[in-house]
């Protein structure tokens, strides 16, 4: 101890060293905050007095080949929440969630979870979009009661023709938490919507654009005071399709009007493979996914049929396969057009009897009438003459049994090729009875409506099998040169010119004098083939394929129509193809009765409302 209460010099030195060290630490920390971390602290201070309100960039538009907007944007009110601070307690959010739930018709627990997430993330969150005017006025009153609640105007996706081409265009929807974590580095927010199906999903990166926003000054209660800064958005790129809106609309509405309302219709330009229409029924309204009514959204999700019958449905082609059988037999020299076959209504081979669809029989028929009347016995005979191997080879050349690899449609099915070679690869044998089934498009042979449209286009252009394309061009928003998708040949069917002549002549006779009379159109050259495909699970499927041209011009449209459980192709599927062809050439339907009191349509755009569907005939 020290004498007389004096402190030893050594202890004073230690104390001064401690004070100096503490001062040095504080000085260094102050220097770090003032110099090294100045930007970070400045941002934190700025965050305390401001909030960024993100505004969705207008998504790129999708147009048809004629400039008709199929997917665009519309202004809409959105309800946002700006969390006043991280210290906001759970009990403060609960009454707000309950009030919003009452106003919006939403689950209060879901809203509470969203509010808590906004507090954790310390960022604004969108609670509701596309609010009706009345709801918007009611919610505006909450701004004076609950801190952080506000309304903004922004662009939202809008499909002006509703259910139009829904499987092709797709729809917008919210991301899962896993998807958001993956997309967050690309600038996506937790409440961002992305393309969930079809072209909206395929072209997500091109259509999205870059969001903008408003940096707003807020008071201690989270109320917006004034705009500090405005960050401009960058609109997405525009997509121009090969689709013809008039043909697509005719396909959609005609299929809905069939007896079952289920099936698919595809139209292709035989000159270059342009996809003019691709309809799958039943369809859906993509606008319903953007509704403010949770019940409507939930109902839409539950009833959503994402299965695209046009590319994913595989069916026996039935008699629509007969032109390929005829081409094989004619080109290989196994028959002559004038050769006649007697049809008693059945064909017997190896102790088995194979029936013709007309049990009374067609009597003596040659090539033209055999195809026009779709005589099964005639095709049993020429199928055996050509041989299963030749028929299989020609079917493969037309692209059957193979995916078209239409860009980015991963759900496309390949169907199943049927023939001796396919059977051999599977370790099984081939018999004459199999050839008879193959000759009428039955047995194990299955195709998609897209494949049949491509094959029909090849029948029209004498052998060029085009890969279908749906993108005409992409006009990039950032000024890059437009992307243009060029036509692409998949293969060429090699056959004699005389065989092509006979097949095309026969397909024309089907329309003028045979089973395809329901697709006859004065002033146009229409060629086609009906088909009825056996279905072990119910009523037969109805098929119709056709191509059409103005006199003296090459065919500019090829169509394949399938109506599930539709029965006879001539009475059910042919009228659908007929309306699509009429729409393609801009012709009115002379056989359709006009309504006595036509009402004004609420559908915007230059596409005229189609006339009522003609009465079905047997």
Image: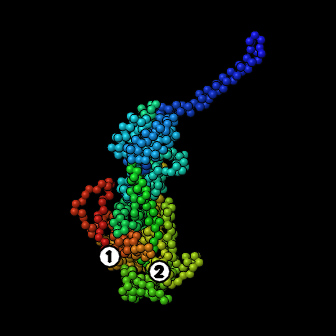
Question: From this viewpoint, is residue 229 visible?
Answer: no
In the rendered structure, the answer to whether residue 405 lies left or right of residue 31 reads left
Residue 379 image position (x, y, % from top left): 43, 82
**x 24%, y 63%: residue:** 595
Toward the viewer: 479 or 296? 296
Q: Which residue is mark 2?
A: 437
Classify mark 1: residues with Cα within 10 Å, few (<14), some (14-19) or many (20+): few
Residue 132 image position (x, y, % from top left): 35, 46
Residue 199's disc is none
Q: Residue furthest top?
A: 4
**x 51%, y 61%: residue:** 410
Classify mark 2: residues with Cα within 10 Å, few (<14), some (14-19) or many (20+): many
Give above or below for 141 relative to 26. below
Q: Earlier in the sequence, mark 2 or mark 1?
A: 2
Q: Measure the alpha-carbon separation of dots 2 and 1.
A: 25 Å
Q: Which residue is mark 1?
A: 618
**x 40%, y 50%: residue:** 294
């Amino acid at each position: 101890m020290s004498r007389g209460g004096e402190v030893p010099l050594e202890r004073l030195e230690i104390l001064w060293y401690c004070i100096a060290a503490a001062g040095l630490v504080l000085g260094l920390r102050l220097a770090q905050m003032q110099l090294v971390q100045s930007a970070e602290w400045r941002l934190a201070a700025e965050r305390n007095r401001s909030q960024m309100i993100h505004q969705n960039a207008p998504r790129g538009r999708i147009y048809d080949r004629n400039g008709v907007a199929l997917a665009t944007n519309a202004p809409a009110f959105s309800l946002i929440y700006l969390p006043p601070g991280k210290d906001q307690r759970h009990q403060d959010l609960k009454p707000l969630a309950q009030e919003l739930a009452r106003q919006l018709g939403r689950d209060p627990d879901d809203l509470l979870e969203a509010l808590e997430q906004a507090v954790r993330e310390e960022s604004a969150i969108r609670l509701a979009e596309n609010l009706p005017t009345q709801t918007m006025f009611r919610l505006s009153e909450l701004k004076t009661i609950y801190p952080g609640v506000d309304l903004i105007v922004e662009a939202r996706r809008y499909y002006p023709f509703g259910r139009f081409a829904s499987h092709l265009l797709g729809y917008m929807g919210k991301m899962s938490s896993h998807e958001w974590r993956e997309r967050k580095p690309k600038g996506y927010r937790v409440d961002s919507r992305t393309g969930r199906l079809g072209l909206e999903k395929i072209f997500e990166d091109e259509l999205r654009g870059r969001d903008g926003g408003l940096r707003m000054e807020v008071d201690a209660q989270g109320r917006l005071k004034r705009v500090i800064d405005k960050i401009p958005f960058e609109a997405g790129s525009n997509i121009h399709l090969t689709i013809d809106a008039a043909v697509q609309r005719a396909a959609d509405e005609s299929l809905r009007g069939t007896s079952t309302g289920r099936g698919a219709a595809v139209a292709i330009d035989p000159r270059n493979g342009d996809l003019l229409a691709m309809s799958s029924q039943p369809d859906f309204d993509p606008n319903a996914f953007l509704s403010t009514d949770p019940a409507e959204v939930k109902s839409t999700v539950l009833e959503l049929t994402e299965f695209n019958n046009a590319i994913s449905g595989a069916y026996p082609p039935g008699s629509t396969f007969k032109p390929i059988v005829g081409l094989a037999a004619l080109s290989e020299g196994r028959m002559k057009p004038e050769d006649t076959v007697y049809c008693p209504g059945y064909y017997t081979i190896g102790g088995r009897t194979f029936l013709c669809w007309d049990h009374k029989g067609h009597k003596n028929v040659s090539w033209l009438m055999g195809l026009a009347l779709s005589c099964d016995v005639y095709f049993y005979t020429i199928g055996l003459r050509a041989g299963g191997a030749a028929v299989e080879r020609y079917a493969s050349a037309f692209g059957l049994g193979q995916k078209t690899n239409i860009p980015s449609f991963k759900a496309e099915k390949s169907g199943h090729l049927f023939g001796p070679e396919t059977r051999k690869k599977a370790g099984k044998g081939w018999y004459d009875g199999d050839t008879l089934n193959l000759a009428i498009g039955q047995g194990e042979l299955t195709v998609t409506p897209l494949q049949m449209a491509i094959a029909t286009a090849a029948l029209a252009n004498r052998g060029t099998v085009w890969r279908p394309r749906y993108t005409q061009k992409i006009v990039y928003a950032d000024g890059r040169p437009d992307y243009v998708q060029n036509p692409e040949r998949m293969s060429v069917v090699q056959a004699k010119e005389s065989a092509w002549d006979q097949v095309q002549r026969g397909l024309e006779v089907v329309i003028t004098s045979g089973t395809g009379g329901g697709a006859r159109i004065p002033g146009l050259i229409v060629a086609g083939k009906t088909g009825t495909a056996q279905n072990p699970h119910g009523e037969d499927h109805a098929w119709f394929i056709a191509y059409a041209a103005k006199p003296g011009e090459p065919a500019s449209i090829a169509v394949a129509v399938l109506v599930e459980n539709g029965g006879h192709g001539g009475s059910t599927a042919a009228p659908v193809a007929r309306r699509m062809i009429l729409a393609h050439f801009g012709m009115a339907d002379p056989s359709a009765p006009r309504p006595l009191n036509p009402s004004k349509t609420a559908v915007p755009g230059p596409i005229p409302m189609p006339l009522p569907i003609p009465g079905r005939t047997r």
